[in-house]
Image: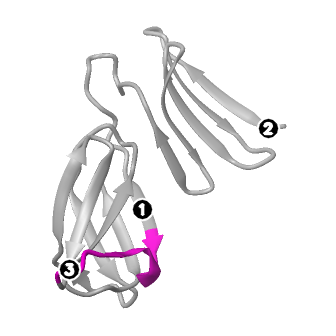
Amino acid sequence: MASIQLQFSNGASVSLNQEPAPVVSIQNGSAPVVSIQNGNVQAGGTANGMGSKFDAHFKKNFTNLMWTNLGNGYYEQTIVHNLDKKGAVQVFDNYDNLLIVNVDHIDTNSVKLTTSSIFSGKIYIN
């Protein structure tokens, strides 16, 4: 198994492991900050030990079957992103058109989308 690890004097480290699947991990001492594997980002902790959140992002594809009909001409969908922040939200349809939907941050780990029509597409949160 090939791997590279950089250890810094403040206890932070960056490692790259190539097998069985490539993984990049960043740690602040023993606390994980971010891990990237197969394009998936898992965030946690702080980036530089000074309390700032690492600028992790979230992407999810969804289908028109994932919307809940509210019965009043509107549909909603709750997305759990676990970024521990109220990030900027962008919603696109399957043709990569940026859509305007109502976005409510339920908490720092989830958002609720509300729209008057259902569609398939993707959501980006950063």
CA neighbours of label 2 inside 10 A, class few (<14), some (14 to 19), many (20+): few
Residue 125 placement, left or right of 36: left
Q: Residue drawn at (37%, 75%), measured in percent from left and top?
A: 67
Q: Amino acid at mark 2?
A: Ala
The mark total stands at 3
Residue tagged 1: 59
Q: Is residue 71 magenta?
A: yes
CB atoms of marks 1 and 2 within 8 Å: no
Residue 46, percent from left and from top: 35, 25
Q: Is residue 19 magenta?
A: no
Query: In the drawing, what numbered circle is on residue 41?
Result: none
Residue 24, percent from left and from top: 59, 40
Dot placed on the residue nearer the N-terminal end, 3 or 2: 2
Residue tagged 3: 74
Residue tagged 2: 2
CA neighbours of label 3 inside 10 A, class few (<14), some (14 to 19), many (20+): some
- Labels 1, 2: front one: 1
Q: Nearer the viewer, residue 48 or 105?
A: 105
Quadrant housing residue 6: top right
SS at badge 1: strand
Q: Calculate the distance from the C-alpha at mark 3 to the C-alpha at mark 1.
A: 23 Å
Magenta residue span: 61-72
Q: Calculate the distance from the C-alpha at mark 3 to the C-alpha at mark 2.
A: 52 Å
| Residue 97 sits above or below residue 86 on the image | below
Dot placed on the residue nearer the N-terminal end, 1 or 2: 2
Screen quadrant of the N terminus? top right
Residue 25 placement, left or right of 103: right
Residue 34 placement, left or right of 78: right
| Residue 38 sits above or below residue 35 on the image | below
SS at badge 3: loop
| Residue 67 sits above or below residue 5 on the image | below
